[in-house]
Image (cartoon, coloured by chain):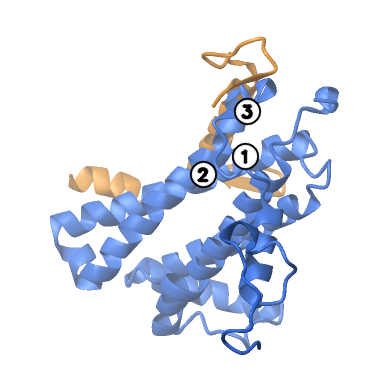
Chain colours: A orange, B blue
Amino acid sequence: MVATAAVLGGAGHFLHWGWFSIGLSNLLIILGMILLFVLALVVPFPGGSASDEQGG
Amino acid sequence: MRAVGTAAPVSPGTQGTQGHDNWTRALRARIERTVPAGQVLPDRQPVYVASWIYVFGVLTLAALTVVVLTGGLLAMGGAAWWHVSSLGRFVNSLHLWSVELFFAFMVVHLWGKFWMAAWRGHRVLTWVTGVVAFVASIGTAFTGYLSQSNFDAQWISAEAKDGLNSIGVGAWFNVLNPGQMLLWHVVLLPFAVGVITVVHIVLVRRHGVVPPIDDEGV
């Protein structure tokens, strides 16, 4: 528990590219949201039909 | 006003159709004009809505519902409760993580609407109210961080003070005043987010869900 708290409460890992730096956890969350966005575009929606309207 | 006994009889079926000579009729007519009949809670949608990208608006609303409910519980229990009791810490965590999901869903919703140019078809005000809701939500979340009543809140408020003063808004509120920030967080800003969210949803119902760009004739 103490070790977990120490890890979570630490300064965290930061990545640096020249003038740009970002926390690793923030970068992972942003990449996860982009992945979620792409999946929302390409994954078929269940119950989709070819009619003009459908129940929602 | 006509004297009693001389008024022309008005059958129930004709009431409300004879102009807007009082504010009740005017308001009712305005409400009826704002959202077309049958569009308040429609049970059918155009076929292009059958896509996961159209789900993120209602996911944002679902997360906001959890945010409001857990925020209400935290307001009932108070700071001592959410710091020291197991149940209080659990509800505090629910409040935090529902906010995280709220923003994640809202940003994916924003990306989807941006890339499909959702302001098309007289939907500019829908887009603008969404932007205002986003900005108001950021302010609400920020004052939430300031209301934790711990060292994080103290550090964030001290860091934010200089940034806010540098853009000239420091005269309107004081982020170093935890009582003021707590009241902004639980009263003023949630009220603003709630009102603008209702307006946003009414506009979505009024104009319908925006079609894909290559399906504009639908």
Image quarter hosting the N terminus of chain B:
bottom right
Q: Is residue B32 at least partly visible in the picture?
A: yes
Q: CA distance from mark 1 to mark 2?
A: 8 Å
Of pointers 2 and 3, the one earlier in the residue sequence: 3
Q: Nearer the viewer, residue B36 or A35?
A: B36
Of pointers 1 and 3, the one earlier in the residue sequence: 3
Instruction: Give the amino acid at mark 3.
Output: Gln
Please identify the quarter of the rendering in which residue B109 is found.
Answer: top right
A13 left or right of B206?
Answer: left
Q: Residue A28, image x and y in percent?
A: 52, 35
Q: Residue B199, image x and y in percent?
A: 62, 58
Instruction: Give the amino acid at mark 1.
Output: His
Residue beneath disc 2:
B60
Residue B109's tag is 1
Q: Nearer the viewer, mark 1 or mark 3?
A: 3
* Mark 3 Cα-neighbour bin, 10 Å: few <14, some 14–19, many ≥20: some
* Mark 1 Cα-neighbour bin, 10 Å: few <14, some 14–19, many ≥20: many
Q: CA distance from mark 2 to mark 3?
A: 19 Å
Q: CA distance from mark 1 to mark 3?
A: 18 Å
* Mark 2 Cα-neighbour bin, 10 Å: few <14, some 14–19, many ≥20: many
